Image (cartoon, rainbow, N blue to C red):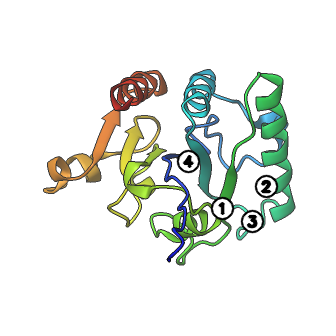
């Protein structure tokens, strides 16, 4: 008699860009004193955690390759952000994935960081997951995810003007607050 193998239930993940989504994009931020957290993202993180979603950060950090700061600064900043979340009654981020390169398979829009996250957390269902960013490069070369781009300092025209835009799973929001409302409605409708 064959024994059935229990497979872990797949769960969605909220993939977040860092600079511009979690914090104000002040350019090559590596010190928590200069890490200005967007208040709206705390509501987003809280809702995702309450609903049982994984949360991972996917961030390009080319400041290392440019010599502006060290990789150890990135790790320390992420630890300090986790402490900040705990102080605000939230859980730590499940995983931080970053690329220090100027080019290559790990740097967004390439899907290297996503693949690394999916290998680390095999319970993530990429087809039920969302990536939130503020740049065209935050739309990864992976069609399984749904994408939300938040208007900010970067031109989203290449996405909006793409002939495939209406066919892609991309939603453009005018603010993080607007994304929060879209996300909360999506979470409620999936229950």
Q: Relative to 125, is 8 on the left or the right? A: right
Query: Which residue in the protein does label 2 denote?
Result: 74
Say which element carries label 3: loop
Looking at marks 2 and 4 on the same chain, the residue that comes earlier in the sequence is marked by 4
Mark 3 vs mark 2: which is more N-terminal? 3
Gap between marks 1 and 4 measured at Cα: 10 Å
The residue tagged 4 is: 17
Question: Residue 64 — which label?
Answer: 3
Expressed as whole percent of the image width and height from the top left, the position of residue 4 reads 51, 68
Front-most of residues 186 and 102:
186
Residue occupying image coordinates x 59% and y 72%: 102
Instruction: Where is residue 156? Give x, y as percent.
Output: 33, 45
Q: Is residue 109 visible?
A: yes
Q: Secondary structure at mark 4?
A: loop
Specify the quadrant that holds the C terminus.
top left
Q: CA distance from mark 3 to mark 2?
A: 9 Å
The answer to whether mark 1 and mark 4 are in CB contact below 8 A is no
Image marks 3 and 2: residues in contact by CB distance under 8 Å = yes
Q: Which percent across, then down, holds residue 184?
A: 43, 24
Q: Label 4: how many residues lie within 10 Å, few (<14), some (14-19) or many (20+)? A: many
Q: CA distance from mark 2 to mark 1?
A: 9 Å
Query: Which mark, residue 98?
Result: 1
Task: Say whether disc 1 or disc 4 marks the residue closer to the N-terminus.
Answer: 4
Q: Is residue 90 left or right of residue 177?
A: right
Mark 2 lies on a secondary structure that is helix
Residue 26 against residue 72 in the figure, above or below: above
Q: x, y percentage for residue 158?
A: 27, 53
Q: Nearer the viewer, mark 3 or mark 1?
A: 1
Q: Which of the two residues, 134 or 90, is positioned nearer the viewer here?
A: 90
Q: Are marks 2 and 1 in contact (CB under 8 Å)?
A: yes
What residue is drawn where x is 39% and y is 53%?
Answer: 136
């Amino acid at each position: 008699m064959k024994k059935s193998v229990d497979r872990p239930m797949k769960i969605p993940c909220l993939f977040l860009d860092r600079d511009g989504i979690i914090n104000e994009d002040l350019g090559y931020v590596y010190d928590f004193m200069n890490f200005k957290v967007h208040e709206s993202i705390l509501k987003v993180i809280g809702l995702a955690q309450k609903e049982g979603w994984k949360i991972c950060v996917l961030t390009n950090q080319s400041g290392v390759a440019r010599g502006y700061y060290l990789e150890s600064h990135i790790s320390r900043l992420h630890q300090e952000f986790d402490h900040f979340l705990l102080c605000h009654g939230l859980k730590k981020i499940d995983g931080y994935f970053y690329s220090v390169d100027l080019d290559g398979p790990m740097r967004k829009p390439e899907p290297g960081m996503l693949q690394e996250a999916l290998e680390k957390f095999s319970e993530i269902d990429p087809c039920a997951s969302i990536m939130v960013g503020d740049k065209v490069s935050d739309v990864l070369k992976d069609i399984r995810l749904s994408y939300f781009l938040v208007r900010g300092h970067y031109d989203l025209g290449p996405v909006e003007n793409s002939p495939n835009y209406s066919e892609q799973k991309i939603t453009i929001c005018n603010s993080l607050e607007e994304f929060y409302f879209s996300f909360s409605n999506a979470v409620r409708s999936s229950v």
